[in-house]
Amino acid sequence: MAVEQVAAQVAAFAKLGAGIAIGFGAIGAGIGLGIATKGLLDAVSRQPEIAGKALIYFIIGAGLAEACAIYALFIALQLLG
């Protein structure tokens, strides 16, 4: 194969990899946030007096779950650029 064909295939696989990376990153963050939200609502429904403290922990956990999506976005941008 010519060098141009190999370069075109590498670029195509990089775009495919970027799509897969951002897709799995978004799925992981969505599942993580869903599980965290379920846990928060279960805890608050059982003990309403812990709502303030539980919300703080939920926000910290949601930020960590969103980090997965941000890392996936960073990897996708690196593959495309």
Image (cartoon, rainbow, N blue to C red):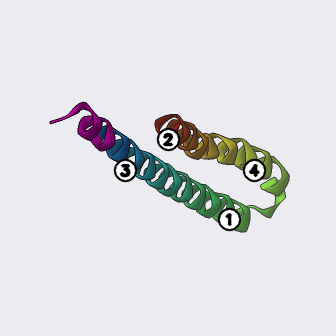
Residue at the image position 73 percent from the left and 62 percent from the top = 44
Quarter the N terminus occupies? top left
Q: How much space separates mark 1 and mark 2, taking CA atoms?
A: 39 Å
**Circle 4 Cα neighbour tier, 10 Å, few/some/many (<14 / 14–19 / ≥20):** some
Residue 73: give x, y in percent of width and height.
56, 44
Residue 56: give x, y in percent of width and height.
79, 45
Task: Residue under label 3, please give it.
Answer: 16
Task: Residue under label 1, please give it.
Answer: 41
* Residue type at numbered disc 1: Leu
Disc with the residue nearer the chain's start (3 vs 2): 3
Q: Nearer the viewer, residue 44 or 38?
A: 38
Circle 1/circle 3 CB separation < 8 Å: no
Residue 59: give x, y in percent of width and height.
74, 47
Q: How much space separates mark 4 and mark 2, taking CA atoms?
A: 39 Å
Task: Residue under label 2, please give it.
Answer: 80
* Residue type at numbered disc 2: Leu
* Residue type at numbered disc 4: Ala
Q: Secondary structure at mark 3?
A: helix
Is residue 17 positioned above or below 46 on the image?
above
Task: Residue under label 4, please give it.
Answer: 54
Residue 39 as seen in the image, left or right of residue 31: right
Span highlighted in magenta in the image: 1-9
